[in-house]
Amino acid sequence: MDDNDKKSAKGGIFLIKDITFKEVFTPEDFTNEHNDIAKAVEDFIKGEIISLGDEIEVLNNELSRELMRKAGELGFLGIDIPEKYGGMELDKISSAIVSEKFGYGAGSFTITELNHTGIGSLPVALFGTEAQKKKYLPGLSSGNLIGAFALTESEAGSDALNPLTTATLSEDGKYYLLNGSKQFITNAGFADVIFTYAKVDEEFFTALILEQNWEGVSVDEEEEKMGMHGTSTRAYHFDNVRVPVENILGEVGKGHVVALNALNMGRYKVGAICIGSAKSSFDEAVKYSKQRIQFGRPICEFGLIKEKISEMAIRLFAAESIMYRTAGLIQAKLEDLNMSSDDAGIRTAEALEEYLIECSINKIYGSETEDYVIDEEVQIFGGYGYIHGNHPELAYRNARINRIWEGTNEINRIVIVNTLIRRITKGAFDLMPTFHQVSDDIEKLEPVSSDDTEGLNAQTKLIEIAKNIGLLVVGIAYKKYEKGLRDEQELIGMISNILIEIYSMESALLRSKKMLKGKKSERATIPVKMTKVLFHDSLEKIGFLARKALEAMKNGGLLGKHLEIIRRIVVSPPINTVNLRRNIADAVIGYGRYVI
């Protein structure tokens, strides 16, 4: 990506700007260092985690701490931490690779590692003072200290910035008295450092650093959870905990900056582990389908099983394309950053905030792809998939949490549109002229009537149509409600889903185009077919969502006109999706696993 590309890559701009394949990062762009990191994590998981068998899914905090130390010794806990504080200081591509690999094979330990390296370390890495970083980051990077992120309360779940926990400054001004409770805290059973949040003077939402062994900090018994049985999840209680003023993280009243940026990185990482988990389930499903004989032949030879396998592969391809495109955007924003500089943490937080929309899409699409793939894995296994001890049953239980934490997928859908509204209002997006242009030009658009078998010309035209429809709906909604759109949550959900479909379609399209132009263009054959099927199905979803959104807004006499335009242009060219799906399924069944 050249300098001009980097400068143009603003968060959320994909809705307005035409993006070229040269501007996106894809897995085909991995360097030797990226591949080395992937191999190192795979070796660690095979040697230290898979070898434990079922033991990794049984709660054992001492084992978790031992594994964290080993992961720390190999540098996996310090990927995002500057070298001067004991970290590896690698790029955000490497960070995504590590999370994906843990998601693929580390079971419940994935979440122990994810929580620690994301929201359990990044608050101080991004916003800590020099003294705070020197005190805590070396231990967090090595695994000698375990981090926990204590934000959720019984009455402040999704409304996390409105806690009941309070922090009151002492008369001598040397410490805060912290009182309150936090629940559902990962790693709480054996953590050393706690990043928590409270209202100072019952008004100013503020981040604080605690140490778990301080007087007044207590933990409840372990929660009995649906899945992730090998992870520690407990509640904290704070009873007049004396927090030194130097342990305020960031500024008093600016705790939301710390919390939301940490969560944003967490969403990015959750999307990565979900893709790893989904790939694992996909591989198990394909393997089983080749071994399971019914009516005299393997079930992978049956059409309805091929249909399932192809759809799983298509969604994985789109999710993977989204994740590494987003990782590339964040990395490009940080390319010239000196991680040893005093403002490195703030600059990293700014990059994460810039791509708030993309990170939320990454989390939503990744977790919902994971759920879809694992559900179909259960179905392919049939009754065996429902039985304890088989891969699908455990994967199914472990996956369900990923649509809930780091902001529920509903909250993330709201984040997408609210971020867009905020940027429009502040003038970051020059949306209204674009909207007016779209309103004038959309009638002139013609439906795409034919598809070229080998190329992606039709899909290039279809993404333009999809973006025009998205802009039309967003523009009408903003014109009608302006900031009041925040209160129209059903409409927000529809708009978010349109944006998610557009980002996934375009990410798959650009990756396939890049592969077609690469040195091994023959490798693009299956991705191109995946992209065609994805577009065929996604365009129909966009048309449905757009009509539904416009009908909900009742935009006067223009409603009928706009609905007719959408019905006319949102049409995928006729393609034989049954045959394409068979080709896709045959290819991945031949590989025996997810390989692009």
Image (spheres, rainbow, N blue to C red):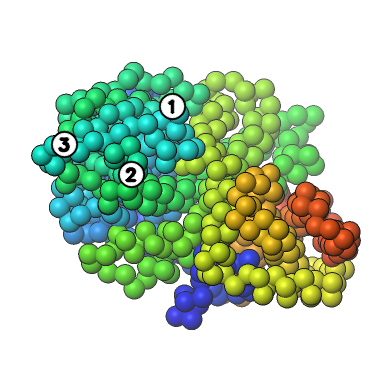
Q: Residue at x 37, y 52 (%)?
A: 257
Q: Position of residue 387 (x, y in %)?
A: 59, 20
In 3D space, how far apart are the residues under numbered discs 1 and 3 (Cα atoms)? 27 Å
Secondary structure, mark 1, is loop
Residue with the mark numbered 1: 154
How far is the residue under mark 2 from the one under mark 1? 20 Å
- Residue 193 shows in this picture: no
- Classify 10 Å Cα crowding around label 1: few (below 14), some (14-19), many (20 and above): few
Q: Please provide percent x and percent y for residue 486.
A: 60, 50
Check contact, mark 2 vs mark 1: CB within 8 A. no
SS at badge 3: loop
Q: Position of residue 517 (x, y in %)?
A: 61, 75
Label 2 sits on what residue type? Phe
Q: Nearer the viewer, mark 1 or mark 3?
A: 3
Which residue carries the number 2 mark? 204
In the displayed structure, does residue 538 sit left or right of residue 96?
Answer: right
Give the numbered dot on residue 170: 3
Q: Is residue 137 above or below residue 327?
A: above
Secondary structure of residue under mark 2: strand
* The C terminus lies in quadrant: bottom right
**First reached walking from the N terminus: tag 2 or tag 1:** 1
Indicate the position of residue 367 as horizontal and vertical percent values: 56, 43
Q: Amino acid at mark 1?
A: Ser
Q: Is residue 470 above or below residue 39?
A: below
Q: Please name the amino acid that badge 3 sits on.
A: Ser
Badge 3, how many Cα within 10 Å: few under 14, some, many 20+? some
Kindly identify the residue that appears in the image at 35 percent across and 41 percent down: 203
